[in-house]
Every structure is written in C-alpha cells, then in structure tokens.
Amino acid sequence: MDPVSNPFAPGAGTPPPELAGRDDLRETVRVALERVRRGLPAKSVLMVGLRGVGKTVLLDRMRDDAEAAGFHTIRIEAPESRSLPAILAPELRLALLRLSRNQQAKALAQRGLRALAGFARSLKVKYQDIDIGFDFEPEPGLADNGDLEHDLQALIEVAGEAARSAATALVLFVDELQYVPETELAALITALHRTAQRSLPVVLVGAGLPQLRGRMGRAKSYAERLFDFPEIGALAPPEAKSAIAIPAAAQGVHVDEDALDLIVQATLCYPYFLQEWGKHAWDVADASPITRQDVELASQTAIADLDQSFFRVRFDRLTPVERRYLRAMAELGRGPHRSGDIAEQLNRKVTSLGPTRNQLIAKGMIWSPNHGDTAFTAPLFDKFMRRIMTGDDWRE
Ligand SMILES: Nc1ncnc2c1ncn2[C@@H]1O[C@H](COP(=O)(O)OP(=O)(O)OP(=O)(O)O)[C@@H](O)[C@H]1O
Ligand SMILES: [Mg+2]
C-alpha cells in the first residue's frame, strides 16, 4: 500500500499513531499533579523500562497532558556527558521567566531568577558546563553556597513558592535519568524531599533504564519512599493488537486476526517492534486487508531494518571487548545470566571481566536485576548479537 500514508512510526521518541496500554499510568500522573497543585501529598513518578518500550513518548504525552491542564513544565534529557545542573538551569530559567509574567507570582519568580543567578555563578567552578544568561543580580546568601545539594534545594524551593503563588505546580520531566551521576541524583532527591515536606507544588516525572531504581536508592536511602517506580514494559496482547489495528482502521485498512496474532508473536508486544512490524506489513500488503502472509514477508524486512537502526546504533558504540562480552551473554540466551556463566563462555575469571561489565552498565547496555546477575537493556538483543557475530572467534 501507499508508503506515503503509512501511519506507523518506528523511531526513538517518535510518537506512535496509537499510544496503546498507557492510560492507567497517565491517569496516575494526572491525579498526582492535581493533588500537588492543591498542596496535598503525592509521590513523584519514575518510570523504568527497557530500551524501546515507550518511556520517552509516554513522558512527552504526559507533558502535553500537564501543559493542557495549566501546569508549568520543564522537559530535559540527561545526557551521558553533561552535568544535571547545566541542563536544568536554562530550562528552569525559562520556567521562572514564564511564571514571572503572572502578577501573583511575579515577585517570587524574580526571586527565583536571583537564586538561579547565584546558583549558576557559585557552581560554575565545579560544573564548568553551566552556561546561562542572567536576568537579575544574585541575592547574597540565596542558593550561592557552591554546594550542589544545598543550592539546588534552595533554588527548587523558591521556584516551588513561585509556582504556588500562581496556583499552579512546577513539573520536571526528565528522561534518561539513569545517566545522572549519583551525587547529582542525591541533590535532586534532597530538593524534592524538601519541597514535599513543605507541601510546595514541585513534582518530578522521570524515566530511565531499570538500573535507575537501584541508583536512586544508593544516592539516598529514603528515595524508595519518596518515589513510585512503575515499570513500563511490553504491552498486553490485546493492547499490542490495538496499536496496529486502530491506526490501520483510521486509514480504512483492516488487519486480519491471524495477521495480528503473528505480529504479537514476532514482536513479543514490545512497542518499538510493533511500530516496525506495522510499518513493514503495511508496505508489503497490496491492499486491505493486511493478511498473515503479508506479515510473514514483513518479518524479514522488519528484522533487517531493526538490525540497521535500533540494534545497530547500540552495537556501534561498543569496543571489541564489550562486543565479546555481550556475545557471550547472547550465547546463553535471553537472560538474566550469572557473571560466572558469562566468564566461563569467555574462558576468563569473573574478576577480570568486572571493568568491562561496569563500562557496559555505564553505557546503558546491560543492567543488574540482582546481585551477580546481568541482563540486556534492549529486548531481543541476544538474538541480534547472534545474527551479527556469527562464528566462534569471539571466544578468544
Ligand atoms: N504505547 C505504545 N503503543 C504503540 N507504540 C508505542 C507505544 N509506546 C511507544 N511506542 C513506539 O515505540 C517506539 C519507541 O518509543 P520510545 O522512543 O519512547 O521508547 P523508549 O522507552 O524511550 O526507548 P529508549 O530507552 O531507547 O529511549 C516508538 O517508535 C514509539 O512510537
Ligand atoms: Mg527514550
């Protein structure tokens, strides 16, 4: 069928034509935000899940929901290389400038901008990547201690006071939170703890790989009580079918039930794969309906596309040693696997592989569901590794 009208959208952070199976979580966040706006307690939400399960698009949808409901939002993505204060400061500045246009919030928002000036100046020595414009002179003693934990708390408190005076809440949407170093995470947790204690309307809605949960706990032991960690994973089969059937039907195209069954089976209901299979099944089919035979053909091109995009970008960032480690894991199947079993595949000692394992965790390629266990962060990565590294030379 005409590829121009193909509704499916495989890609990192590309909004799907039908956001299936996430209504409950959107509702949970909606309720939390409304409660916080009214000065009632609510936990911040940190969504954890594997690569490609739809964390980013869900975060973006929640942000749209929040903006439509009149909240002030900030949206950042924690990169691997820049500091949290550096990426947070410019966005916080914009939020405070917007708040300062509200008459009720003007004075406090301007105080927030003074706090931000003090914050940025005093932390610039330590975090040289902080780079923002100043709208006001700093207020001596306000968020200018030079200590991130103290200053971030002071800054977020003033911002929360400004939001409260405007009868709104400040919502921080942060993606890829697992990349934030633990000291910076600790500062963020402390700041949110303080605003929660003071019933100030500030909420964090974050997303990250499954290791985020452990990192938060190590950064601050009370983090588990302060946050909810809903798991985002594969969809249930009926939801996965809706993700395919609804966008097709919107274009007047029917998808046969046994075709949908095969898509469910091939994708394990993982959102990224669903979009890829939907796209290829559409392109393969000559006309409505999309049949099981179309999906059989589409499976081959869909896998080839995944190997060139979703999997390939991750593989390309690996050193040869890291590739061998992942290939050894793949040899053992889907996982999780014991470190000892992986080492055995490589004829190496567990301790000598420790640094490689740590690098792979830092890169977000693997995580540790339990002590001594290792699992891939991308679904079906084991099968990909076996396709791309055939032969036996990885064992040396
Ligand atoms: N609920 C859903 N229903 C249907 N498709 C979805 C859903 N959620 C996400 N998708 C699709 O899955 C793909 C991956 O989404 P997204 O980039 O948000 O995943 P992610 O979890 O952020 O991945 P990563 O960890 O790699 O950043 C996109 O093509 C998106 O359109
Ligand atoms: Mg993402």
Image: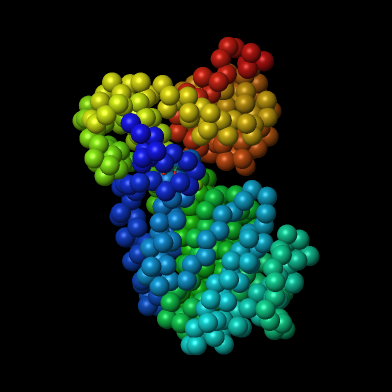
Q: Quadrant of ligand 1?
A: top left
Name the residue at 57% across, 87% down. 107
Q: Is residue 393 visible?
A: yes
Residue at left offset 64%, top offset 48%: 80
Q: Is residue 85 left or right of residue 225?
A: right
- Is 139 left, or right, of 217 in this rendering? right
The N terminus, quarter of image: top left
User: Picture coordinates of residue 175 (x, y %)?
Assistant: 52, 53
In this rendered view, identify the residue nearer to me: 63 or 209.
Answer: 63
- Taking 259 as reference, is 94 above or below it? below
Tell me: residue 214, above or below residue 305: below
**Left or right: 340 in relation to 81:** left
Quadrant position of residue 391: top right
Residue at (55, 20) in percent of width and height: 388
Q: Which of the 4 image quarters holds residue 354?
A: top right
Q: Nearer the viewer, residue 239 or 245?
A: 245
- Residue 337 visible in the current orientation: no
Image spot of residue 123 (x, y percent): 73, 67
Residue furthest toward the right? 125
Query: Residue placed at 42% from the left, 81% from the top?
Result: 167
- Residue 43 screen position, x and y as percent: 42, 64
